[in-house]
Image (tube, rainbow, N blue to C red):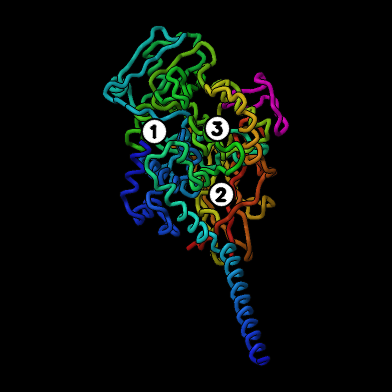
């Protein structure tokens, strides 16, 4: 596979390579014949996944790809700009016509399977715009460093998802009263290649499973879900860490206890119950599963580094979200938090969708500024200006986003 | 006779002087190039490796050219071959090079992979692997918020 790709790339000229990369290859003429830079291989693979080549590949085995913040400016995140966080390898063969979903576990009356067609025809479809943010978004700022993909702030998306309500399906299957958790099972391959291992099998409490917006989705932004995002069927539970929204869904387990699949165990996707000192290891008993994500905002326009002349106002734009809560205020500061001004903030299109904010900023004099944004949720909780409480796996960094600008 | 000798000497001295001037100018040029245009030199070196990388049927481990190592962020050093042999089979080398840990921290990561991800026992190779990782991928203090890294552009 890899060899084939290399061979293919060798056949196309430097100019096409440059256009694939979206940039000139400096000193390309000095490049040895037959030598294909790793970066280009990645770019080719990114393109085959339908991604904008400007996305940042943190890891290509498994795929972990981050969106630069200024590319998150769309109100509805398009597929080509959506971050990827995979734990295993992409499923190789997807037979949509024979795809089935099995509902099993201690708390189902009777195990039952549905074909994809049955799911689509038997149940009513709903569409919601849902924020999916990786639990480890912002990890790279923690010190001491936390293990895992070193995400900046771009592991978040808010696309439109269409599918059936999980609660409608659960009702059709028949669930026992002792059900407490729903676990998912996907068809991705464990990195070790061991077929008896699941790369990730997380889930949600039964109360989350019964929310209107919790979907078994088969469409994203009105089209079949792209392969990297869970084609042909995906669980989508907005507001929770995106890792609960299982991709390439083959089965779900209705459990009479907290689901114990892969990456449900401590310390994965858990944070200390009693806060710990930076770098301190803590016992598994002191770790709780992350549920709603915290309040956060991003300035998506302009891209950091803008220079403009004095007298010109700067129109900033961005999005804010607060897990399962609503954002009630977004403010900006150009003096490192000394004073804050409110931004204009839109209501969400539906629950668990991000909200858009904007402001028009006048600068008093020439010089270097940072524009900081701070969102506050309906519980009165705001984003911290510094990196929040350290935790062993580096989750939930919701520190204020900031951009640099220069007035000249 | 004496006058001719002196003339010869003078010619020799001025030739030597010219050579010195030329050498000094070349040295300054080279220093400036390293300072401002290191890509040119890198290009020369890349060229000199042509025969090695252009080979077709090389075993997998020889695919780790210095360019490829650089692109994934790995550095030459004692233990590198063991890292390549043990740490890049299941996941990308980039997962290694993104992370920064102390010796103890790297050992914890290895244990986590062994306990939950089916990673094998490294035996006597563990020490040199951990040495390599904790030497080249050690944590750097960055406080609670680092200064922004900025690429300036003109906003229309």
Nearer the observer, disc 2 or disc 3?
3
Residue A141, position in %: x, y? 62, 41
Q: Secondary structure at mark 1?
A: strand
Please identify the dominant SS of the magenta region: loop
Residue A298 in the magenta stretch? The answer is no
Taking the image as shown, residue A329 lies to the left or right of residue A113, namely right
Residue A102 circle label: none
Q: Please name the residue that numbered disc 2 is placed on.
A: A343
Nearer the observer, disc 3 or disc 1?
3
Q: Residue sitting at 30 percent across and 19 percent down?
A: A115
Q: Residues at marks 2 and 3, common chain?
A: yes
Q: Secondary structure at mark 2?
A: loop
- Label 2 – label 1 distance at C-alpha: 28 Å
Front residue of A6/A391: it is A6
Q: Residue furthest right?
A: A277
Q: Quadrant of residue A19?
A: bottom left
Residue A161 circle label: 1
Q: Please name the residue that numbered disc 3 is placed on.
A: A135
In the rendered view, would you say A208 is above or below B100?
above
Examine the rendering and report whether any part of residue A322 can be seen. no
Label located before the other in sequence (2 or 3): 3
Q: Residues at marks 2 and 1, common chain?
A: yes
Nearer the observer, disc 2 or disc 1?
1
């Amino acid at each position: 596979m890899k060899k084939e790709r290399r061979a293919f790339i060798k056949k196309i000229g430097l100019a096409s390579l440059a256009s694939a990369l979206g940039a000139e290859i400096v000193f390309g003429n000095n490049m040895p014949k037959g030598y294909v830079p790793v970066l280009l291989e990645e770019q080719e693979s990114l393109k085959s996944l339908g991604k904008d080549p400007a996305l940042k590949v943190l890891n290509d085995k498994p795929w972990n790809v981050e969106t630069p913040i200024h590319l998150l400016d769309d109100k509805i995140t398009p597929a080509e700009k959506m971050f990827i966080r995979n734990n295993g390898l992409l499923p190789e063969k997807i037979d949509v016509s024979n795809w089935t979903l099995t509902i099993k576990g201690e708390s189902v009356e009777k195990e039952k399977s549905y074909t994809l067609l049955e799911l689509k025809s038997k149940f009513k479809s709903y569409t919601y715009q849902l924020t999916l943010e990786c639990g480890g978004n912002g990890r790279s700022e923690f010190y001491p460093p936390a293990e895992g993909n070193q995400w900046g702030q771009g592991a978040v998306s808010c696309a439109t998802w269409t599918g059936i309500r999980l609660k409608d399906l659960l009702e059709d299957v028949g669930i026992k009263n002792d059900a407490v958790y729903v676990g998912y099972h996907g068809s991705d391959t464990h990195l070790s290649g061991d077929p008896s291992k699941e790369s990730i099998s997380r889930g949600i409490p039964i109360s989350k499973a019964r929310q209107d917006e919790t979907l078994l989705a088969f469409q994203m932004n009105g089209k079949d879900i792209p392969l990297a995002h869970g084609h042909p069927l995906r669980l989508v539970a907005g507001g929770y860490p995106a890792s609960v929204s299982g991709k390439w869904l083959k089965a779900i387990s209705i459990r009479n206890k907290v689901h114990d699949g892969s990456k449900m165990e401590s310390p994965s996707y858990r944070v200390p119950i009693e806060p710990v000192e930076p770098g301190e290891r803590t016992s598994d008993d002191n770790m709780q599963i992350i549920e709603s994500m915290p309040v956060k905002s991003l300035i998506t326009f302009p891209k950091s580094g803008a220079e403009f002349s004095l007298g010109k106002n700067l129109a900033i734009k961005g999005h804010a979200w607060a897990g399962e809560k609503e954002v009630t205020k977004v403010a900006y500061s150009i003096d490192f938090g000394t004073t804050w001004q409110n931004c204009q903030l839109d209501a969400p299109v539906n629950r668990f969708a991000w909200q858009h904010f904007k402001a028009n900023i006048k600068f008093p004099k020439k010089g270097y500024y940072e524009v900081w944004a701070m969102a506050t949720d309906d519980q009165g909780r705001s984003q911290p200006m510094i990196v929040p409480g350290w935790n062993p796996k580096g989750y939930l960094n919701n520190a204020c986003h900031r951009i640099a600008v220069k007035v000249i | 006779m004496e006058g001719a000798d002196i003339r010869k000497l003078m010619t020799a001295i001025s030739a030597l002087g010219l050579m010195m001037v030329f050498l000094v100018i070349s040295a300054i040029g080279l220093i400036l190039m390293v300072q401002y245009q290191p890509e040119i030199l890198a290009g020369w070196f890349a060229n000199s490796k042509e025969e090695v990388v252009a080979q077709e049927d090389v075993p997998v481990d020889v695919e780790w050219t210095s360019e490829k190592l650089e692109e994934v962020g790995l550095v030459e050093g004692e233990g590198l071959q063991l890292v390549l042999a043990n740490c890049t089979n299941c996941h990308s080398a980039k997962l290694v090079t993104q992370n920064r840990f102390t010796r103890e921290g790297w050992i914890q990561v290895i244990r986590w992979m062994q306990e939950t991800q089916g990673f094998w026992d490294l035996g006597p190779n563990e020490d040199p692997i951990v040495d390599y990782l904790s030497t080249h991928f050690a944590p750097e203090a960055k406080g609670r918020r680092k200064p922004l890294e900025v690429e300036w552009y003109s906003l229309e």
